[in-house]
Amino acid sequence: MTKADRIFKENIKKILEEGVFSENARPRYKDGQVANSKYITGSFAEYDLSKGEFPITSLRPIAIKSAIKEVLWIYQDQSNSLEVLNDKYGVHYWNDWEVAGSKTIGQRYGAVVKKHDIIGKILKQLAENPWNRRNIISLWDYEAFEETDGLLPCAFQTMFDVRRVDGEIYLDATLTQRSNDMLVAHHINAMQYVALQMMIAKHFGWKPGKFFYFVNNLHIYDNQFEQAEELLRREPSSQEALLVLDVPDGTNFFEIKAEDFRLENYDPVKPQLKFDLAI
């Protein structure tokens, strides 16, 4: 059993056995019913990418390319436009969060990245002094939230640090999420930000290092308990899946494409499970 699968099963079991139910929940299912969840607080995991540990489960298929395209939309295009996400990348699952016919998700995610030139500043800081301790992406912008409606960012903070080990420089990353849907989004979000970490590392010719993942509220929705039990019954793959970014060291961050990534040794259990999303 891989590290990711072990952690996944442990988290599912902990939520089912020790979690508590949400109260006054905001999300709704598409039929209008309140989407309550069972949750735990303060979930943390560590993966060493340099040793082949990646936060992706083999217990069900994960759509890695779509997830990476979303990262490019946010951090390369620096866009909140659903037309860009739909037409350029063929990704449509954000459409349920369109704000009032605006064809956008409001002043969120990519709009905040563009507003503060976050990627430009991060790359500049790392170029000038890789060992500075201020390489922080924060998408939590109260001023932007007051400008429009829209889903507040779940994966809202990422921090980067470097280490030199035996002459090699490794880029570490820490992702913090306020909220995470354990069965649907957990490994999608984790692998998205591993991809972002790899893109920044590749920009400078460094190695991807450790990935730290903290979720404040880790939950399973109340219409997913059957799927949770099925995932616990499944026998996972014994081999680690590897995400590879196949471009030369020093490739400019903004020139990296989704097609430059490939997932090796990935043999997830099928069939895929169906989940009704909470909006």
Image: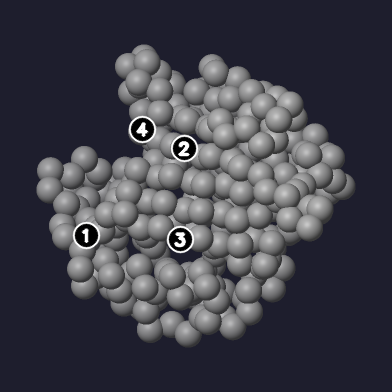
- Mark 3 → mark 2, Cα distance in angstroms: 16 Å
Residue at x 51% of width, y 60% of height: 46
- Mark 2 → mark 4, Cα distance in angstroms: 12 Å
Residue underneath mark 1: 38
Residue at x 51% of width, y 40% of height: 158
Residue at x 71% of width, y 68% of height: 264
**Residue nearest the viewer, comparing 156 with 233:** 156
Q: Earlier in the sequence, mark 4 or mark 3?
A: 3
Residue underneath mark 3: 45
Residue at x 39% of width, y 41% of height: 154
Instruction: Tell me where residue 47 sits by quadrant.
Output: bottom right
The answer to whether residue 53 is above or below residue 160 is below
Element marked by disc 1: strand
- Mark 1 → mark 2, Cα distance in angstroms: 24 Å
Q: Residue furthest left?
A: 23
Residue underneath mark 4: 152
Element marked by disc 4: loop
Residue underneath mark 2: 157
